[in-house]
Image: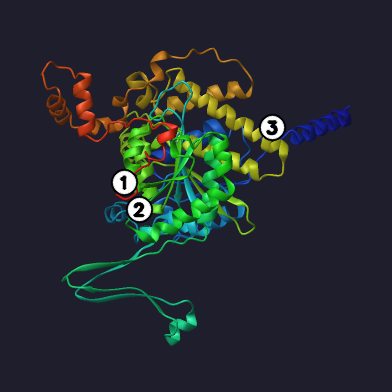
Amino acid sequence: MLATTMRRAAQQGRRLMSDGLTAEGKIKSLPMVYIKGEEMTRYAAQLMLENWLEPHIDTSAWEFFDLSCAARDASNDQTLKDAVAAGAKIGAIFKEPTVTPSAEQVKEFGLSKPLPSPNGAMRRGWNGVTISRDTIHIDGVELGFKSPVLFERHAVGGEYGAGWKEVGKGRLITTYFPDKESFEDGEDAIIVDARILDNERNVAVVYHNPLDNVEALAHHFFSRTLKAGVTPYVVTKKTVFKWQEPFWAIHKKVFDENYKAKFLEKGLLENTGGELQHLISDAATMQIIRWTRGGFGMSAHNYDGDMLTDEVAQVHRSPGFITSNLVGVAADGSPIKEFEASHGTVSDLWHQHLRGEPTSFNPLGMAEAVMGALSHAADLSKDEETARKTHEYVTCLRRAMHNTFKYGQGTWDMAGPSGLTTEQFVEKVGNRLSKYLAQESDDEFVDPSASKPSVLLRRAAKQVDTDKVQELFAEFDTDSDGSISVEEFTEMMIKLGLAPPKEPGKESALRAKIDEGA
């Protein structure tokens, strides 16, 4: 009898393992790197780990790294080096927001020395190509953009890697040497720039833009925008900064040779004259505000991408409502993807939490990052059944989180004062997730009031100068009747540069292109 029981148990164990589950019924562990950060986001991520992940997923194959300032300082940044090495090996990474300490924070945290941003080391160590940042949408909840906005930010080059020196009057020469020998013997040197500095104080800055991976960036961008069904735009300031021309030229060549026919077939170039359209960065800034219907994608240099995606986040609602995904390439050519929220560590809520006050942190951005890392780990896995189970889990978690918002049970930024605290929200989503994984019905009803959360619920709304708002209102309420007519509103929109332009027809699309000579 005992032997029979043991044999049945062994058979059951083998069946569970073949179904992508452990003997305990959890989803089998897929290799993944988990990077811990700092402050409120670290606290919330720990709640997510305990309530959403560990009850359902075996995490024994995950590698955990602590990139808090204290841990980096204590290890002389060895923990960062180890995390980068692990990410290069495994390829699927989730990262909590981290702190790059200011001079004041170095003292506050008791650090032995300043610490550089970990992002540079990660982008170099993972051969970063692009940082994808997309709007997050919840079906049935109106946020900023009506349809998805996709963004690619070149992950290397530009001002972030600049060398600089404060100097006085004199001559400044920037010289290029093709190799070590030419540097040593002075031959084959090329003067990139030479100028006279006639100010008593100057800051000399040198940086470059690597171009070898722009072709890979372009393929990634056009593949994603084609799949999402949105219109692609390439953003530069090449009309003034002539050195930005190659970025555009590489994108154009890749597009024309590989993607143009496919975009035309799907009707995605109707408003761009059937061609890939270039936007100067100034124009892109205005169009992001105007194109609130969404349905577009942009690819830009490192700095422009950083600034423009911040604008996308604010139009959509806040940085917590867009994704951030570093895409790199491993030595064997396989994709390395690191997922994180696009916001910071939310210090104000952390200090509020430390004071024992209730908080209501919305973890949507971090949840999307976790789901992205899990999905990529599944895509890299050769264990098809475990990969399938992992994707099913991600689908259930996203559904549980989105429905919690739709049912009017969101955090304060979405549901107002009657919303849930940080802990209550995580618990509510966790309970709903367990139901969905067990294929149980959900008896909740959609709350109509949750479909269009007021922008006044955002934490940033507390920083608005209401007196200045009143002054601005009075300026355009020309008849002082306490309301603004359509005519007055139109005048206001034009004056503020926010008036939406007329949509060009197909026949006039070419003439309606953004003036690139600005």
Whichever of labels 1 and 2 marks the residue nearer the N terminus, that label is 2
Q: Which residue is mark 3?
A: 24
What is the distance, in whole Å, between disc 3 and disc 1 at their CAs?
56 Å
Secondary element type, mark 2: loop
Whichever of labels 3 and 1 marks the residue nearer the N terminus, that label is 3
| Label ID, residue 282 | 1
What kind of residue is marked 2?
Answer: Lys
What kind of residue is marked 1?
Answer: Asp
- Is residue 173 at least partly visible in the picture? yes
- Residue 347: % across, % down: 33, 41
Q: Which residue is mark 2?
A: 237
Are the residues tagged 1 and 2 within 8 Å (C-beta)? yes
Foreground residue among 139 and 439: 139
> In the image, what residue occupies the spot 22% across and 34% down?
496
- Residue 378: % across, % down: 64, 41
Q: Is the residue 356 above or below the residue 210 in the image?
A: above
Secondary element type, mark 1: helix
The quarter of the picture where residue 57 lies is top right
